[in-house]
Image: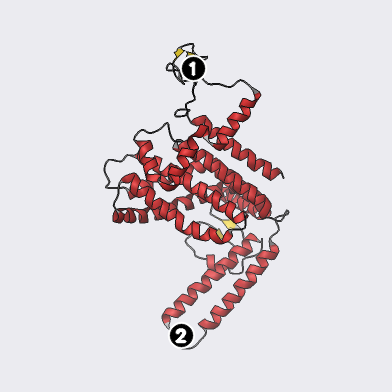
């Protein structure tokens, strides 16, 4: 139950942080002219022209819950104008925000903060109900089962390799397959704290990190040997803690997705004049926000027993949305959009890989 409370707290925390960076413009309420309670200036409308404070204020304990609910649910109403645009007309939303239509929509950073916190909160809530890790972190049985499967595959590949009149090309492919399978067995044995079955694979290797037959790390530096060995030992003895660190660091460092993605958006738009790095940042932030909200939606569908529709939606919607977002944000032709989309797809894979690598290193070394 503590996981559920923690997830709810994370969602509210994200909403309030997003609310804190979001201005209140575009959310007018009818008020009579009067005096600003902040600076004393005469106010004729809903906001003070001198300091910008809203005329309409609350002074009750209910106002606290009002602020929380407004932060979580609709950022004073703007979320309901922003989400439909983000889902169905993302290019128009991005161009409108860049060109100055700021007050009517939730800003990219506020929406990003809200969606990222909400995504990890929902995943934490679902995970506490559906993911059961062994309390002692003992995965010996699972490792032994996987190792038995690999042994069988190696034996089958070696039998095929021993067949007479085997083509040279087939021999090379089988040798590569066998080497890959043996490397997997080495990895499983190291995770399980066992001697490597094929230490000869690392003899004479060009990698700066060497692993001896008894599973000891050898980088050539005792300092880094201790760090890497200690990190891998932590992951091996307490994988539950590692997963928790990955989840925790995930939303703390989710902002890294923006600078990691920006160079690839810039590269994809190379040669398209009139667009600055700021435009790319707005495009990237709104795009990541949509994908985060989509993942939340898919996670809820899967939990609700509708897992059959999750894969089709996850396959079709992201590329289609990214196509529309890219085309109408940058006023591209169909062919131009497809060409630049291919570059973006490569960039997305690289960015996510780097992000996951950073999270893993933080989890292991933290």
Q: Quadrant of the C terminus?
A: top right
In the figure, 155 relative to 362: above or below? below
Residue at 45 percent of width and 58 percent of height: 316
Quarter of image, res 1: top right
Residue 262 in view in this figure: no
| Among the two numbered marks 1 and 2 on one chain, the one whose residue lies closer to the N terminus | 1
Choose mark 1 or mark 2, whichever is in front: 1
For residue 127, which numbered disc appears in the image?
none
Along the line of sight, which residue is nearer the eye, 65 or 203?
Answer: 65
Q: Residues within 10 Å of mark 1 (few under 14, many from 20)?
A: few
Residue at 32 percent of width and 48 percent of height: 269
Task: Give x and y (percent) for residue 108.
Answer: 44, 38
**Callout 1: SS:** loop
Task: Give x and y (percent) for residue 187.
Answer: 59, 63
Read off the residue under disc 1: 32
Q: CA distance from mark 1 to mark 2?
A: 91 Å
Along the line of sight, which residue is nearer the eye, 308 or 31?
Answer: 31
Q: How many marks on residues?
A: 2
Read off the residue under disc 2: 166
Task: Give x and y (percent) for residue 221.
Answer: 54, 51
Residue 269 in view in this figure: yes
Q: Residues within 10 Å of mark 2 (few under 14, many from 20)?
A: few
In the figure, 225 relative to 195: above or below? above
Task: Give x and y (percent) for residue 224.
Answer: 56, 49
Residue at 52 percent of width and 14 percent of height: 37
**Callout 2: SS:** loop
In the figure, 7 relative to 69: above or below? below
As drawn, is 10 to the left or to the right of 47? right
Along the line of sight, which residue is nearer the eye, 141 or 223?
Answer: 141
As drawn, is 170 to the left or to the right of 95? right
């Amino acid at each position: 139950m503590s996981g559920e409370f923690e997830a709810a707290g994370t969602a509210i925390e994200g909403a309030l942080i997003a609310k804190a960076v979001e201005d209140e413009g575009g959310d007018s309420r009818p008020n009579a002219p009067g005096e600003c309670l902040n600076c004393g200036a005469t106010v004729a409308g809903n906001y003070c022209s001198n300091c910008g404070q809203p005329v309409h204020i609350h002074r009750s304990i209910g106002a606290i819950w009002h602020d929380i609910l407004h932060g979580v649910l609709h950022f004073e109403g703007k979320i309901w104008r922003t989400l439909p645009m983000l889902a169905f007309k993302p290019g128009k939303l991005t161009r409108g925000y860049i060109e100055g239509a700021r007050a009517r929509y939730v800003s990219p950073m506020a929406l990003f903060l809200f969606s990222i916190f909400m995504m990890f909160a929902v995943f934490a809530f679902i995970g506490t109900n559906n993911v059961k890790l062994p309390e002692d972190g003992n995965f010996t049985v699972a490792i032994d089962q996987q190792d038995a499967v690999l042994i069988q595959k190696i034996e089958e590949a070696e039998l095929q390799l021993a067949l007479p009149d085997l083509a040279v090309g087939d021999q090379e492919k089988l040798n590569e397959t066998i080497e890959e399978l043996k490397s997997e067995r080495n990895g499983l044995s190291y995770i399980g704290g066992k001697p490597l079955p094929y230490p000869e694979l690392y003899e004479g290797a060009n990698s700066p990190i060497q692993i001896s037959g008894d599973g000891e790390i050898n980088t050539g530096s005792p300092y880094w040997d201790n760090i890497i060995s200690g990190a891998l030992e932590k992951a091996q003895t307490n994988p539950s803690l590692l997963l928790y660190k990955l989840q925790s660091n995930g939303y703390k460092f989710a902002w890294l997705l923006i600078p990691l993605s920006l160079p690839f958006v810039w590269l994809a738009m190379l040669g398209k004049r009139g667009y600055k790095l700021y435009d790319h940042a707005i495009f990237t932030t709104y795009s990541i926000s949509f994908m985060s909200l989509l993942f939340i939606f898919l996670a809820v569908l899967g939990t609700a027993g509708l897992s059959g529709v999750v894969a089709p939606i996850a396959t079709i919607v992201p590329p289609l949305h990214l196509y529309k977002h890219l085309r109408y944000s940058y006023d591209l032709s169909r062919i131009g959009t497809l060409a630049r989309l291919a570059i973006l797809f490569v960039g997305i894979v690289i960015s996510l890989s780097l992000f996951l690598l950073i999270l893993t290193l933080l989890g292991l070394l933290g």
